[in-house]
Amino acid sequence: MARIVMKFGGTSVADIARIRNVARHVKREVDAGHEVAVVVSAMSGKTNELVGWVQDASKAEGSNLNIYDAREYDAVVASGEQVTSGLLALTLQAMGVNARSWQGWQIPIKTDGAHGAARIAEIDGSFLIKRFGEGQVAVVAGFQGIAPDNRLSTLGRGGSDTSAVAIAAAVKADRCDIYTDVDGVYTTDPRIEPKARRLSKISFEEMLEMASLGAKVLQVRSVELAMVHRVRTFVRSSFEDPDAPGMGDLLNPPGTLICDEEEIVEQQVVTGIAYAKDEAQISLRRVADRPGVSAGIFGPLAEANINVDMIVQNISEDGKFTDITFTVPSGDLDKALFVLGKVKETIGFDAVQSEPGMSKVSVIGIGMRSHAGVAATAFKALADRSINIRAITTSEIKISILIDGPYTELAVRTLHSVYGLDKQ
Amino acid sequence: MARIVMKFGGTSVADIARIRNVARHVKREVDAGHEVAVVVSAMSGKTNELVGWVQDASKAEGSNLNIYDAREYDAVVASGEQVTSGLLALTLQAMGVNARSWQGWQIPIKTDGAHGAARIAEIDGSFLIKRFGEGQVAVVAGFQGIAPDNRLSTLGRGGSDTSAVAIAAAVKADRCDIYTDVDGVYTTDPRIEPKARRLSKISFEEMLEMASLGAKVLQVRSVELAMVHRVRTFVRSSFEDPDAPGMGDLLNPPGTLICDEEEIVEQQVVTGIAYAKDEAQISLRRVADRPGVSAGIFGPLAEANINVDMIVQNISEDGKFTDITFTVPSGDLDKALFVLGKVKETIGFDAVQSEPGMSKVSVIGIGMRSHAGVAATAFKALADRSINIRAITTSEIKISILIDGPYTELAVRTLHSVYGLDKQ
């Protein structure tokens, strides 16, 4: 007997037929004798609809500004998960499974007071564990909790993943299964490289890099949480037949296990190739090389809510001036240039050069820590294809390369092949 | 300065444009210096959608039975009011009005444990009153509360009226305004009798009779509650221009005041004519006239959830046998006959005669207590029109007459005229 948390996203609970399918997945685990908590998102499209209403409602007449009370946003938007948790409990009951729904405030899932993007502060797992003991399945509304002001809070988009992992940690679950519309984590995007393979295991650290790079399988924060609490997390498909052979396998169900790197016996040097399109490159020329200059640039950008990604700064030749290059989402380029224009005088730089339509391609692998030459392999492979490298950043387990957008697919395929990921 | 509770139904909050209109009604009262609590229903159609999902979800495969856990029903269905309360709070904020939403469990509105059709047990008004003191408008999700098991409960269809009146009683409001899609209570249905007049006042007792007879302006329970707690309740239209002259009149806003009969100075003998279509008449012939026979008939019907309306039983001639006539909704006739067939042996009666397609027309007026001849006037007027009277029941303030369905409109118009209700 194991204790399992199962999470189902919006497309998996989009209508009653799909909710019934979800219930069959749950029943399979219950029938196998496991203790189960299920975390559900809102029906797909529902959260967007609710957010749209919030934006409409909070528009003052004749104004285009959209400022709203995040506490009311939370009250409205949290209703989506409330609905699906009740519907799944009912569906399970109709299948003869003892189940009840739990709202965030009932468990309670206590969060901080940052309405609209709250962080989970504390979950008391004892109530759920008591119900497990009584043979009851807990169906938990994801994405929501209760803030210190006794009002509903939500965790930000994709927050149900985080709910699931946090609950898994709170009840000391053996496994947290994230059911989604893909059947696992791949070595790269299969739409670009049909030879992409599903990984059977990936380390938390690698998954973090993959997730933050737009492999939108899991919310980044949920991976962080899983890493901190060492929650073995499975990414698997909700659309497979719930009763197909192997689906109920306790140790090796179909999907990708995100786990501690120690668990991964045969480590690859490179685990996957990720990419992010629509980046804009901004270069500041002849920036005065003195303390505080970076803060002077990136502080105002952060205040303007612009998400700066790669940052490259070379050591200056003369100790006086340097060039700084960084990337922002293409959609934020104009806003970024406006902000930079305002701080030009204070910072002191010669010129701003910018270019939208860039892509960032990343090579990720925990094994590269102990293998030399991983980066060089990438550079040579891209050069062989005449793909121009605009900028490079590296971390312990990742090399990111900025290239011109139209070369994205070619670069991904090239790197996927050169690191041997094509081979089964 | 007054303290006012305002309630808006589903059609009044059907979309953001209408919610904005509701907010203008609220702002008018706030600007006049009043303390305001607003109670909202779900967007029209939303509750039906949610109920439909609940029914779908709880259908066991291959079964037509529809039994579901009312606690989960409540969790799902209560979400509709949660959404509108948040949206109205946001809309008010965008207009510069200090407002916040309250869910039933936050106030809390404590109910009994009868999930799906709970009754309000207790409301602590002190939190709301404290916020009034801080100049804040309370936007309360109607229809919902919290049950002793710490789970969401709902009050049954139309329950938001009851929420509003209960909150008005809890905060000792000067007035409870029920905004709806009609502009008041009429002497009869204006679709049948264009000369129907809007009543400026009606007593609680009369309104109870009108409401239970299908003048579906107000939920019956809310009228009972208003009567017990002497809540002055206004029925008025949400679709009128919120800023039209007189709309903010504290004592005589446009609409119908439901109040204590002492407040009604010029009492009419008859206040209104109500009707209910699609009644079926059932007559049991030669029923043994002994104690317990009524219980033997109406007990099984109640258990089968059949709503018996009029009951007529004459004193038997010989002390041995009597005839019993009663009505049920036409849709329940077959079920009722089936139930009666099963108890025929036990009860002992000769025959069952039944006829669907009847109508019940009722004359209602508190003044008839002290006026003789009110009933005789009705009988004569109907006889003059050759309308056959099938059965008659009376109470202190009501005469109900069962007639053949096709004569409904003629009977309503005839009675409306004969009691002088046509005159302005």
Image (cartoon, coloured by chain):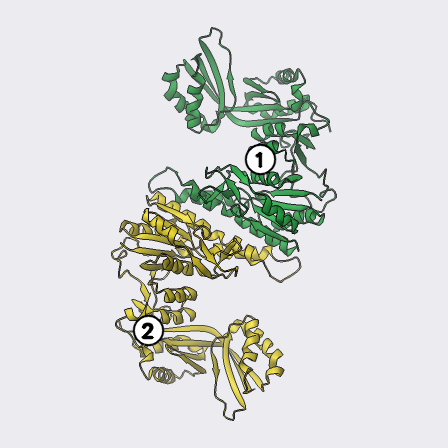
Chain colours: A green, B yellow
- Which quadrant of the view contains residue B268? bottom left
User: Which residue corresponds to the image point at 33% horizontal and 79% vertical from the top-left?
Assistant: B368
- Chain letter for the residue marked with disc 2 in the picture: B
Instruction: List x then y, in percent, for residue A101.
Output: 57, 50
Q: Which mark is residue B407?
A: none
At 52% from the left and 60% from the top, the residue drawn is: B113
Q: Amino acid at mark 1?
A: Ser
Residue A222 image label:
1
- Which quadrant holds residue A183? top right
Q: Is residue B338 left or right of residue B148?
A: right
Observer-nearest of A144 and B228: B228
- Is A112 on the left-hand or right-hand side of B188? right
| Nearer to the camera, B134 or A143 | B134
Residue B149 visible in the current orientation: yes
Compared with B312, B208 (above or below) is above
The reply to whether label 2 and label 1 mark residues of one chain is no
Tell whether B132 sits left or right of B302.
Answer: left
**Position in image of residue A227 (x %, y %):** 61, 31
